[in-house]
Amino acid sequence: MILLVSHAGDDHLAPVLTELDRIGGAAVVVDTSTIPRSTAMCAEHTSSGDRWRLRTADGAWLDLRGCRSGWWRRALPSPLDPRIPDQGQAAWAVNETYEAMTGF
């Protein structure tokens, strides 16, 4: 599995997906601007090991142990959450979400 971190507005994404499909490469696209609304991150750390997963926009959980390659291109931050009335706190939440994703 190839993890493509990009977004629908990236004009390079469609040709990459077309080529991967042509050669039989399995790929999943993650749009970071949808975190945490429709995409989620989950990190589990136990004595038996670590597990990193993403819940994609369609609700499916992707275990990142199955990803062997990645393509990070023009990842977007999440928009401000309208449920957070203080603009400073909303901007902080956006930054923390983005930092979590880049570290993930």
Image (cartoon, helix red, strand yellow):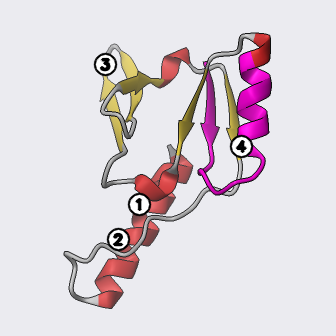
- Does residue 32 lie above or below 79 as drawn? above
Marks 3 and 4, how far apart at CA: 38 Å
The residue singled out by tag 2 in the image is 93
- Percent across and percent down for residue 69 are 69, 25
Q: Is residue 59 left or right of residue 94?
A: left
Whichever of labels 4 and 1 marks the residue nearer the N terminus, that label is: 4
- Does residue 14 lie above or below 34 as drawn? above
Whichever of labels 3 and 2 marks the residue nearer the N terminus, that label is: 3
Task: Report the mark closest to the observer, 4 or 1.
Answer: 4
Residues marked 2 and 1 touching at CB (< 8 Å): yes
Q: Which residues are magenta?
A: 1-21
The residue singled out by tag 1 in the image is 97
Query: Front-most of 46 and 6?
Result: 6
Local crowd at mark 3 within 10 Å, few (<14), some, or many (≥20)? few
Q: Is residue 60 left or right of residue 14?
A: left
Q: Disc 3 marks which amino acid?
A: Ser
The residue singled out by tag 3 in the image is 47
The numbered disc on residue 13 is: 4
Under circle 2, the secondary element is helix
